[in-house]
Image (cartoon, rainbow, N blue to C red):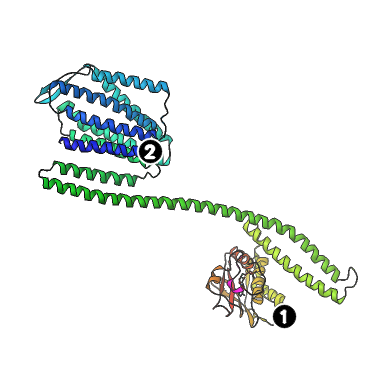
Amino acid sequence: MNVAILAVSILLNILFGGYVFAQNKKNATNIIFFILSFVISIWLGIFYLSLVPFSSTVNLVLVRLSLLFAVIMTLFFYFLAWVVPQEKFVMKKIHFFFIVFITCLVAGIAFSPLSFQSVAFINGFPTPAPGPGLAVFGLYVIVGAMATLVILGKKITTRKGDQKRQLIAILAGFLLMYILLIGTVFLPVALFQNTMFVPFSPFYALLFLLLTGVAILKYHLFDVRIVATEIMVSVLVVLLLFEGLTSGSIREVLFKLFMATVVGFLGIAVVRSVYREVKQREEVTHLAESLEQANLRLQELDKQKTEFLSIASHQLRTPLSIIKGYIELIEDGAYGKPTQKLRETLRDMDMSNERLIHLVDDFLDVSRIEQGRTKFNFAPHDMSALVTDVADELRARAEGKGLAIVWNPPKGVSEIRMDEEKVRHVIFNFIDNAIKYSDAGDIAVSLALERGGMAVRVRDNGIGFGKVDEANFYQKFYRGENVKGVSVEGTGLGLYVCKKFIEAHQGEVWAKSPGAGKGSEFGFWVPVK
Ligand code: ADP
């Protein structure tokens, strides 16, 4: 290792520290990080120089200085652990002064003859003679490092999310640096005067600084993948630079520097793309969260609407029944014999009232379904008889529009367990709709035994519908595209209720049509079991 390489790594350290500082000059974390990177750099320089044989006086000063800076470094590691990730440095005065006092004391001892008395050159290697003060120094560094670890560890257990990951990265960098420095640099130097790994110490420091710096900068978008990529790229570039600067000829140096630059640019592109991807993923997560919230809100609104519907309908139902009763009483002459004119008016009133009752009943059905209050009475009933019943009930209305209901009951048994009221409601709705939505042709009703169940089909030659409608008919409040502009009233609730009733029988419903104006088929199937 030569001085140039050391200088490059020190420069990188300080530049990076300065960059982190520049990102937020008021933030205590950034400030302390900057100071720490500075102190580490100075220490690296002095430590390196202390291993170069100058003269016994110069080397003595250097070796003491390297101890002094190691003390200051320990203090700032502690401060960094203390402050991260806050913006302000908050520490009790007494705590602060105590630590600073102890640090000054140990620094004094480190720089005094108590630590190293002299330096001799053994085999040309500068070997300082240790004094008793060295133990104090050792104790200080060990306790300091422990305290730093404890603070970081404590914070990690109490913080969550981004902050937690950020702290883990710093802790990992710190541990890694200490372990590498002690294991590969200090112990070999102290025990065997082996300086083989000394050139790596700037790397170790850089590793810590990179991890910590990135953790501080990416406070809001701290992702292990990004950090890992960044560190890999940085290490690669630095390695190439080192290699380039140590290679022999100018041509080689230039070529390797060029390579380092290319790798650097490619690396930046890679880091950017990883960054973008992570950011996008975060955005998607964020969107999903707000969507979920919106969904919950909608569900809540839907529930409120159902409750409102339920209350309103109950309030409406009673007066409508009373009106119906009075209309019948008047028709029956309870208040004197009604004139012909009055009879006609009464019939109109009754029809409007019936429509309203029907509507309110639909509302009530819907709110009962949605609140899970629908009661079902399953018992064996004859499906064929039921269809006959409903067809007879609606025949007059169909004939009023010039339509014929064609219904041929199949031969054989058609008994099935079902809630007769609910299934009647469904058949009634299908035939009623067929009458409503067609102006000519027959309405063919059929019953078939199939797939271990019974299928009822109502076919008409009415307005038909397209694919969009087909997919949506059984939804709540859906009125088809096919009825836009047609003067037929409706709420879009009928089929929804039908579907729910049939589903309660473990059955299914469908709607088919060859197209607009070509008639349609509405049907349901229920299993026999
Ligand atoms: P409403 O009839 O009150 O609008 P429904 O739920 O009974 O509500 O029907 C929903 C929609 O299904 C209707 O608006 C209409 O577009 C369509 N529809 C139902 N029956 C028929 C039919 N026999 N022919 C064509 N379209 C129909």
Q: Nearer the viewer, mark 1 or mark 2?
A: 2
Span colored in magenta: 477-483
Q: Confirm or deny contact between disc 1 and disc 2 (CB under 8 A).
A: no
* In magenta segment, residue 482: yes
How crowded pointer 1 is (Cα within 10 Å; few <14, some 14-19, many 20+) is rated as: few
Quadrant placement of the N terminus: top left
Side of 518 where 207 appears, left or right: left
* In magenta segment, residue 29: no
Mark 1 and mark 2: Cα distance apart in space: 84 Å
In the image, residue 442 sits, relative to residue 77, either above or below, namely: below
Question: Does residue 203 appear in the picture of this structure?
Answer: no
Side of 92 where 53 appears, left or right: left
Q: Label 1 belongs to which residue? A: 400
Q: Of helix, strand and loop, which one carries label 1?
A: helix
User: Looking at the image, in which quadrant does ligand 1 appear?
Assistant: bottom right
Quadrant assignment, res 313: bottom right
Q: x, y percentage for residue 516? A: 56, 78
- Residue at the right extreme, as displayed: 336
Quadrant assignment, res 204: top left
Quadrant placement of the C terminus: bottom right
Side of 116 where 171 appears, left or right: right
In the image, residue 324 sits, relative to residue 150, either above or below, namely: below
Q: x, y percentage for residue 202? A: 22, 35
Along the polypeptide, which appears first: circle 1 or circle 2? 2
Q: Amino acid at mark 1?
A: Gly
In the image, residue 339 sits, relative to residue 361, either above or below, namely: below
Q: Label 2 belongs to which residue? A: 24
493 and 132: which is toward the camera:
132
